[in-house]
Image (tube, rainbow, N blue to C red):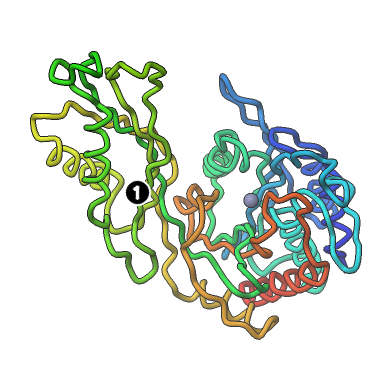
């Protein structure tokens, strides 16, 4: 049987900090080819970005088609001297495996590989349907040459998917705590207020944008955006910076800017959300304050995979292995599931989330074994 701990260690030893492939996809290619998968390595690039290596592998041609998705790239280790165990050494001490990517998400990829190999080994080498791996090297970066392009590349080849499990770390405390069945959308914007520059001692001859931007910020945040839904918390707008850049003490500046981010649920479309914020600003500004909002383009839309047979299948597999009934959650930041949701229902389940991106990122080797058993159980039920 494939050993998820050995696979995770081999993957961690590939220094695949975005955009470097680091040998991680080559390793997965070897493992999957050995198990009979048809493997494609696809590089995407566009002007102004690093070319990125990606992998798509499939075995079987019948329905149903389950996609296991993930990323091999990792965030930089930071100051490596602050790590107790070197970030790419994959040392095991007292039942704990240390290394960058241990939970996010080489450990989960190792568990998926081990589960797939074990499943195929006990079913004559073929799934009762189709199983694929869609693995990118561009998730932790700007995510333009990764999953989003790999999915459209696959679609052009005629690939269709019925369901997907993305292996991001989802569990707050214990393996089995939480499945993510959706994620909020994200929208950045900058509120810009224009004034009239002047001497601070003669405010009647100026129009202070600092005073005015404060009033608009208060008005925008005066009421909640919504009150949440059955599956989502309330949408939230958070101002993250107020920028005037004025170094002169006796000068009223000409412009003030305030950056903000909105995490939003499925109560409104992105366009309706923008209109709501602009209405609030317009109402507070009247014809007294000159303002506008610069909305940034975003590819982070809200999504929800409503509870149903697929979510139930994953939940019951988790329960069988861990004894826990996972909470169905939509919390946290965005993930590549925002792209996958355009092709098939997607849920996320992986390791513990506490260690993501930290110094001394680590995973209990027992969790790798348990997660493998859970994925294995999911495959058994999905193709059963
Ligand atoms: Zn991740």
Identify the image quadrant of the C terminus.
bottom right
Q: Is residue 29 above or below residue 141?
A: below
Q: Is residue 241 above or below residue 276?
A: above
For label 1, the crowd category at 10 Å Cα-Cα, with few meaning under 14, some 14 to 19 and many 20 or more, is some
Whole-percent x and y of residue 173?
64, 71
> What residue is shown at x 76% (from left), y 54% (from top)?
361
> What residue is shown at x 28% (from left), y 29% (from top)?
210
| Residue highlighted by disc 1 | 237
* Relative depth, front residue between 83 and 267: 83
Q: Name which quarter of the figure residue 324 lies in.
A: bottom right
* Relative depth, front residue between 258 and 296: 258
Under circle 1, the secondary element is strand
Whole-percent x and y of residue 222?
23, 52
> What residue is shown at x 78% (from left), y 62% (from top)?
363
**Is ligand 1 closer than 8 angstroms to the Cβ of mark 1?**
no
Q: Is residue 71 above or below residue 131?
A: above
Q: Residue furthest left?
A: 287
Identify the image quadrant of the N terminus.
bottom right
Q: Is residue 126 left or right of residue 96?
A: left
Q: Is residue 258 left or right of residue 85?
A: left
* Relative depth, front residue between 30 and 222: 222
> What residue is shown at x 9% (from left), y 35% (from top)?
286
Whole-percent x and y of residue 331?
48, 61
Q: Is residue 26 left or right of residue 184?
A: right
Q: Name which quarter of the figure residue 79 lies in.
A: top right
Whole-percent x and y of residue 275?
21, 42
């Amino acid at each position: 049987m494939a050993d998820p701990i050995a696979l995770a260690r081999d993957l961690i030893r590939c220094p695949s900090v975005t955009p470097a492939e680091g040998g991680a996809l080559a390793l997965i290619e070897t493992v999957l080819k050995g198990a009979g998968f048809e493997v494609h390595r696809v590089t995407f690039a566009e002007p102004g970005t690093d070319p990125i290596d990606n992998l798509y592998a499939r075995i079987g041609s019948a329905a149903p088609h389950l996609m296991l998705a993930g990323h091999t790239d990792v965030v930089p280790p930071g100051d490596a001297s602050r790590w107790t165990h070197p970030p790419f050494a994959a040392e095991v001490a007292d039942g704990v495996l240390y290394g960058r990517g241990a939970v996010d998400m080489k450990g989960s990829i190792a568990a998926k590989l081990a589960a797939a190999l074990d499943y195929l080994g006990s079913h004559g080498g073929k799934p009762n349907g189709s199983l694929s791996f869609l693995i990118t090297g561009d998730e932790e970066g700007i995510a333009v040459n990764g999953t989003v392009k790999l999915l459209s590349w696959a679609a052009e080849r005629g690939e269709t998917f019925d369901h997907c499990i993305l292996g991001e770390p989802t569990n707050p405390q214990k393996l089995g705590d939480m499945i993510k069945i959706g994620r909020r959308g994200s929208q950045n914007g900058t509120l810009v207020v224009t004034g009239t520059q002047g001497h601070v001692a003669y405010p009647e001859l100026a129009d202070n944008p600092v005073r005015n931007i404060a009033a608009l910020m208060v008005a925008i945040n005066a009421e909640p955006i919504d009150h949440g839904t059955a599956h989502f918390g309330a949408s939230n707008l958070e101002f993250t910076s107020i920028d005037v850049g004025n170094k002169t003490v006796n000068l009223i500046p000409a412009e003030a800017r305030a950056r903000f981010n909105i995490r939003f649920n499925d109560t409104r479309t992105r366009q309706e959300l923008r209109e709501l914020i602009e209405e609030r600003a317009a109402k507070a500004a009247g014809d007294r304050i000159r303002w506008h909002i610069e909305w940034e383009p975003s590819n982070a839309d809200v999504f929800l995979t409503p509870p149903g047979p697929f979510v139930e299948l994953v939940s019951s597999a988790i329960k069988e292995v861990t004894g826990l009934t996972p909470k169905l959650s939509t919390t946290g930041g965005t993930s590549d599931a925002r792209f996958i949701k355009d092709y098939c229902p997607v849920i996320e389940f992986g390791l513990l989330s506490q260690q993501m991106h930290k110094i001394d990122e680590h995973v209990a080797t027992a969790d790798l074994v348990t997660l493998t058993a859970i994925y294995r159980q999911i495959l058994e039920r999905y193709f059963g």
